[in-house]
Image (cartoon, rainbow, N blue to C red):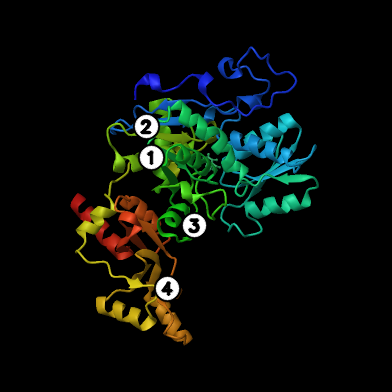
Amino acid sequence: MPASKIDSSKAAGVAAPASAGPGAPSPSIDPRYHRVFPSILDAIGDTPVVRLNRVARDLKSTVYAKVEAYNPAGSVKDRIALHIIERAEARGELKPGATIIEATSGNTGAGLAMVAALKGYKTIFVMPDKQSEEKRAALRAWGAQVVITPTNVDAEDPRSYYSTARRLVAETPNSFYANQYHNADNPESHYLTTGPELYRQLAGEIDVFIAGVGTGGTISGIGRYLKEQNPKIQIVGVDPVGSLYYDYFHSGQLTQPHTYVLEGIGEDFLPSTMDFQYVDDVVRVNDKECFQMTRRLVREEGLYVGGSCGAAVAGALKYLRRHDREGLRAVVLLPDSATRYMSKVFNDAWMRENGFLEPETSLGHVRDLVEERTARKLVSVRAEATVPEAVGVLKLHGISQVPVVNDGKIVGVLFEKRLLERALEGGRSDVPVGELVDASYCTVDPDTEVTVLTELFRRFKVAVVLGEKNVPVDIITRIDLIDYISKANARRL
Ligand SMILES: Cc1ncc(COP(=O)(O)O)c(C=O)c1O
């Protein structure tokens, strides 16, 4: 793109949400040009877009990053904090002297605490214990009260951070629950500010937009705006191994989530702020590649950004390697700053202890594993097949599990163990097997790295390989993986 077409002037950005009142600068001063604001709240938004020169060097595509660390409280969440509070004030839900309560991993808390400090509200934040100490300290610095909850409990457990936040709301008089996971003002703030800014800054010349998915507010709000301008723009979500978005997007299944180290993105439930209608693809990343990419962004691009930024860029590069072409323009959203991760991502001892510094021993991709294994055609059964029909298929092919499909899409995996349980329970055999499927499988694609597959197999019994249009094309068991790795090790000796 000719440089002249990229609008980098502050004056051309979309106005930050204005809260001009007494003390506003004189009308002759354009705050967006002079960067003189009536309050810090007016400095939210209008963040820079920077081209990634080194980490994307091997691609033909041009990759830009929207650097949200430039917001006053340090992250993209300043935008939703201001919008949620101002909309709640306008609706009369937030009254003077109120206490704002939120379940937050830190950034939303910082945004809310900053806005609350200016507007005279109290704040209580509930956060899981895996979040960094810096994040807790930052919230207390804004004058907030912080309540810590255990990470390894279900969302519905009374000790979970969602349940604790709900209890505090019920117990605290004149309280307001910001509820970023189910508050439509969250995606709306991105629809009204981040999306239009990005579109104008890049003069509409965007082919792909990529962002990590937490509440989904960022991707849903920006995705909606960009699709309205140009439905051809591809919207790509990035999800960490352990979260449920990837499998849900590709197979419709809600897999059993598990813990991962990365903060800020990925979920163990489906928030209503996540709207998949604006999402064209979801790619999966693991902790190690995210943290290594975060360090590269700082060292090679000079971008002082946090762990979920490494995740977004690692995911973007994965997607772009598959769709790379001359002239393609992609933009990745980088949510926050490196400041909050000094004791983790930027601490060598912590990185080493967690195995994140070791060089990656490349084991290739799922495609290599499938190609190396003796060729076999995927056997599947239809969801409406009966138990005796499915037993016949398992016996005929000498297999212990079979994917169950409906209209070419996977609905689950049927394991012989479940059929045995069913027989012992004395259950009727004419039920459709679609009702007996097990969710302990994950989905991968041919480009998934085998190292990611090894992580997934700590939790899941089998992996279903999805091809074009998410049609199942193969199934991988643990024994297939063991066989593949043993052969790879033997070759190395
Ligand atoms: C550091 C960080 N990155 C990314 C996100 C994801 O953004 P969203 O919640 O809009 O999906 C969050 C959300 O909490 C975050 O804290």
Task: Give yes or no for contact between labels 2 and 1 (Cβ–Cβ under 8 Å).
Answer: yes
> Residue at 68% of width from left, 13% of height from top?
26
Sequence-wise, which precedes: disc 3 or disc 2?
A: 2
Figure quadrant of residue 409 = bottom left
Which label's residue is closer to the chain start, 1 or 3?
3
> Three-letter amino acid code at disc 2?
Val
User: Residue 63 got which mark?
Assistant: 2
Identify residue for label 3: 257
Closer mark to the observer between disc 3 and disc 4: 4
Marks 1 and 3 close (CB-CB < 8 Å): no
The residue that mark 1 highlights is 316
Badge 4 density bin: few <14, some 14–19, many ≥20, Cα 10 Å:
many
Amino acid on which the number 3 mark rests in the picture: Pro
The residue closer to the viewer here, 149 or 399, is 399
Image quarter of residue 35: top right
How far separated are the C-alphas under marks 3 and 2?
Answer: 31 Å
Cβ–Cβ under 8 Å for marks 2 and 4: no
